[in-house]
Amino acid sequence: MGLLDDVVSVPRRTMTLFFLIDTSGSMQGNKIGAVNDAVVNVLPMLDEISVSNPDAEIKVAALEFSNGTRWLYDEPKLASDFVWQDVQASGLTSLGAACLELNNKLSRSGFMQSASGSFAPAIILLSDGGPTDDFVSGLSKLKGNNWFKAAIKIAIAIGDDADKDVLTQFTGTNEAVFTVHNIDALKQVIRIVAVTSSQIGSKSSTAGDVSKQEQVIKDITEATKDIDGAQSEAAPAPASTDNYDDWD
Amino acid sequence: MQEIHSTCQGESHKATNKVCQDYSYVEITNDLTIAVVCDGHGGERYFRSDIGSKVAAEVTAECMRLFIEGIDKNIFLGKPFTQHNALSTEVKNNDYHKGTEVEKVMRQLFSSIIYNWREKILSHAIANPLTENEVAVVPQKAQQEFANNVGHEKTYGCTLMCYVQTADYWLAFHIGDGKCIAFDEEGRWLEPIPWDDKCFLNKTTSLCDSSAIDEFRFCYASDGSFPLSVFLGSDGIDDSFGETPNMINFYVQILKTIAKSSVEEAKASLEEALPELSKIGSKDDMSVVCVFDENRLSDVVPQLIGWQRNNIKEQIDAINSKIQSLYEKKKIIEDKQIKEKKDKIDFDYTVKDIDRSFKIKESLISKYDKFSRELSPESFVPYSDGICPENKDLEESTNDITEQQPVPYKEEE
């Protein structure tokens, strides 16, 4: 009788990728269309990473926030199963409420399993404006959450009106805030951020002493540096590229 | 008491050509049992943690021998099972307990372990300058610190977990992650040492912390009861199993192998299983120490199998509840008729989840039946609760789940 025979369970570990999507009125039109399009297209890529990764399976959860907050599903879904429901834009930007909602789900009674069976989650925040509610209290609560502390946190600032200070507070560093100025850049950056976070976040170890967050930032910065209309603190757009907003 | 123990290099360490940084140690002499597991940290800054963990285990065994020789055992006399959180946790929770005599001597013990460990790693560092390989891979800053005799604790950093049993009392202590599990004389399991919430995901407390002395948590008992068996496992083990009952199930398999086959076979099986477990599980280094009372082990095998079967039964109950709520959800969607895309998506998810749940249940039933057969081959009856996918009236029958449960296993008098 082997010790690992059919009565012993060795489940795959899980890495959950969270999308936090600003669906306020200012996102209406091409911006929200691009977000919907980009996420639909990236899901099969996440599934590929999950299937080919012996370390962990990837699950996806999505929260939209405008006047209030809404999870697309009441539990994280396997990337292969996730059916994207197009989100619509209208209303305000309740980012503080989104922080509180995320805090609730980053727990055993929410979306997370035991720490032993999990990798730290990856959280991608997309926003084109600034919060219209009590963001400070919401973020303060969220920052006390151990899962959030350990998470890979990346923000995509959609256009110049996005409040980068707020996004920096959320991610903990301005190097994790990537700004996009046009539809094409938005789609490409969503893909790069989601794929890179999933690849690195679902691995048992990173190269050397670099944290997963640092590794993700480094790789995204490198991958986005030549995209017209994309820039970050670590890699400001060169003068020759388009770094003004164009959402038509 | 007898023991089996094994340590193996993790799958990810093989891939990156890193040495195994775990170390396990057991000594059993007359009435004294000392078992230790140490896990060296994996980052580049901790580039001699494999040596640090070996030194920590050796120093701990040495300090324990002196402690037991020198201590007035009466301070433990008649003490019931008592657990102590790390001092840092007590302070954080504003729940600080004034030290009793036992706590004071335990703190002295921890202090002595830390002091001796630091002395030994300092001697090692002085006697062993950076190797060519270390110069090639260790970050410049760490090399500079090493040359200046700064931060050796980090260079050799590791966790430490120890179980000690004498004729009069037993105690266990821990700094860092990994898990200690004890089985009592009735085959029930518990985690005797309190957990430290500072150990979360890849963060752990460590012997190399400047506040290490405040991060030891421990337990002891001297009321005449001794664990039937104690397991010490590094975090590579619990990270592989996710939920604790999965790990307990693995340990029960080890105890059953010892009882039903032999100590030698159990040891060989453990040595074979750990590299495989690392491969399919956490990829980390793996260490397991198991000490056990061979005279009492055979008596509890039925209880151990009973626990395994009940554990599966709980999972079947949970999956039945899930199936029930999925059928309810499906009915709600059907009743309001599918009009919107979201309803269609929800309906498809529900159908898929029902199918998955039944597949999981099928696998659980197979395990349940295996344990039932093991417990009582003569009176084996296959598991059945009437909740199966073929049942057309399932929605109705799920309302009666509790009435259809088989009688759970009960320990014999």
Image: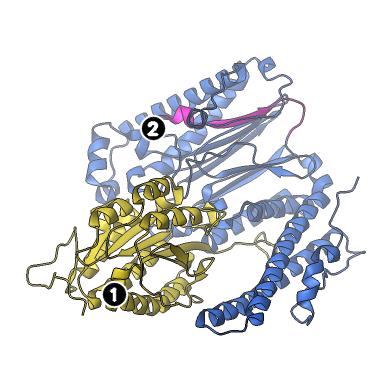
Residue at 31% in and 57% down:
A131
Q: Nearer the viewer, residue B257 or B189?
A: B189
Q: Determine the secondary structure under disc 1.
A: helix
Q: Which labelled disc corresponds to residue A31?
A: 1
Looking at this view, is B391 or B60 the one in front? B391
Horizontally, is B399 left or right of B84 in the view? right
**What is the display colour for chain A?**
yellow
From the top left corner, tell me how far across and down residue A12 is, in percent: 54, 64
Quarter location, residue A68 = bottom left
Residue that carries the numbered disc 2 in the rendered image: B121
Q: Which amino acid, mark 2?
A: Ile
The residue under the point 21% across, 63% down is A161
Residue B363 location, x and y as percent?
A: 70, 70
Where B2 sits versus B364, above or below? Answer: above
Left or right of B97? Residue B13 is: left
Question: Do tags 1 and 2 sit on the same chain?
Answer: no
Q: Alpha carbon of mark 1 to alpha carbon of mark 2: how far?
A: 58 Å
Chain letter of the residue beneath label 2 in the structure image: B
- Tell me if residue B183 is in the magenta stretch: no
Callout 1 amino acid: Lys
- In the rendered view, tell whether residue A23 sits above or below residue B228: below
Tell whether label 2 touches label 1 (CB within 8 Å). Answer: no
Whether residue B223 appears in magenta in the rendering, the answer is yes
Q: Nearer the viewer, residue B235 or A88?
A: A88
**Colour-to-chain, blue:** B
Residue B49 in the image: above or below residue B304:
above
Is residue A192 in view from this perspective? Answer: no
